[in-house]
């Protein structure tokens, strides 16, 4: 499991969102406001991602066009929006990033990681699904990816994946999938 420095993730939570007074740290993931009585729980940010396989049993990776880790390989996906479930979020992200609709998605696992954006650290809870696409699907890189490529399992660039949690996931996934 990726090592998460929760102090980095929670150091920014200082003031009460209800009354604006300084919060007291009760636990690493809990702040209390002595002024208004609010208990503020600090939860991870949820993401979704897809391991997409074509009929040749190749796996799709996308090239990140934004920080963090611009230029590194990733799986297509992104952050879950308010009022979205995991599957709807992932379908939206696949449409935005690749202009593809994947009908059937199967949940595989979840991983925690750190996502540093504009000098703020967020703990993510990444959910990973599996799906199939066809070579006849007309993929088009857009949104926050600059390209994509299919990889055979024996030539999969694990060390060039953008996030430690994905590297960890694929080391296990590729071994189990042989």
Image (spheres, rainbow, N blue to C red):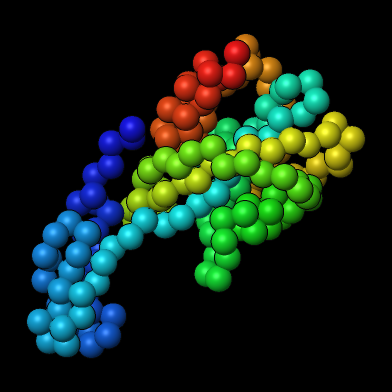
Q: Determine the residue positioned at 20% across, 75% down.
A: 39
Residue occupying the far right of the picture: 136
Q: Is residue 46 left or right of residue 50?
A: left
Residue 138 drawn at (x, y percent)? 86, 42
Q: Quadrant of the C terminus?
A: top right
Q: Is residue 112 left or right of residue 6?
A: right
The answer to which of 155 and 106 lies nearer the viewer is 106
Q: Is residue 57 left or right of residue 42?
A: right
The answer to which of 111 and 20 lies nearer the viewer is 111
Residue 10 drawn at (x, y percent)? 24, 58
Q: Quadrant of residue 86?
A: bottom right
Residue 164 drawn at (x, y percent)? 41, 33
Q: Quadrant of the N terminus?
A: top left
Q: Determine the residue positioned at 15% across, 79% down.
A: 33
Residue 160 drawn at (x, y percent)? 52, 26
Q: Determine the residue positioned at 19% across, 64% down.
A: 30
Q: Determine the residue positioned at 47% across, 22% down.
A: 172
Residue 130 to residue 122: above or below:
above
Residue 64 to residue 90: above or below:
above
């Amino acid at each position: 499991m990726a090592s998460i420095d929760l102090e980095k993730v929670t150091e920014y939570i200082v003031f009460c969102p209800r009354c604006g007074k300084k919060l007291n740290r009760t636990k690493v993931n809990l702040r209390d406001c002595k002024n208004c009585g609010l208990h503020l729980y600090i939860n991870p940010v949820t993401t979704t991602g897809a391991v997409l396989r074509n009929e040749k049993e190749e796996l799709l990776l996308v090239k990140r066009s934004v920080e963090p880790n611009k230029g590194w390989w990733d799986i297509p996906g992104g952050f879950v929006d308010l009022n979205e479930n995991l599957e709807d979020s992932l379908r939206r992200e696949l449409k935005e990033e690749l202009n593809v609709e994947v009908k059937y998605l199967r949940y595989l696992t979840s991983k925690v990681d750190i996502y540093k954006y504009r000098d703020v650290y967020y703990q993510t809870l990444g959910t990973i699904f599996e799906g199939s696409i066809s070579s006849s699907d007309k993929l088009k890189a857009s949104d926050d990816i600059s390209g994509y490529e299919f990889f055979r399992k024996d030539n999969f660039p694990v060390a060039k994946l953008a996030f430690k949690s994905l590297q960890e996931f694929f080391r296990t996934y590729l071994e189990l999938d042989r």
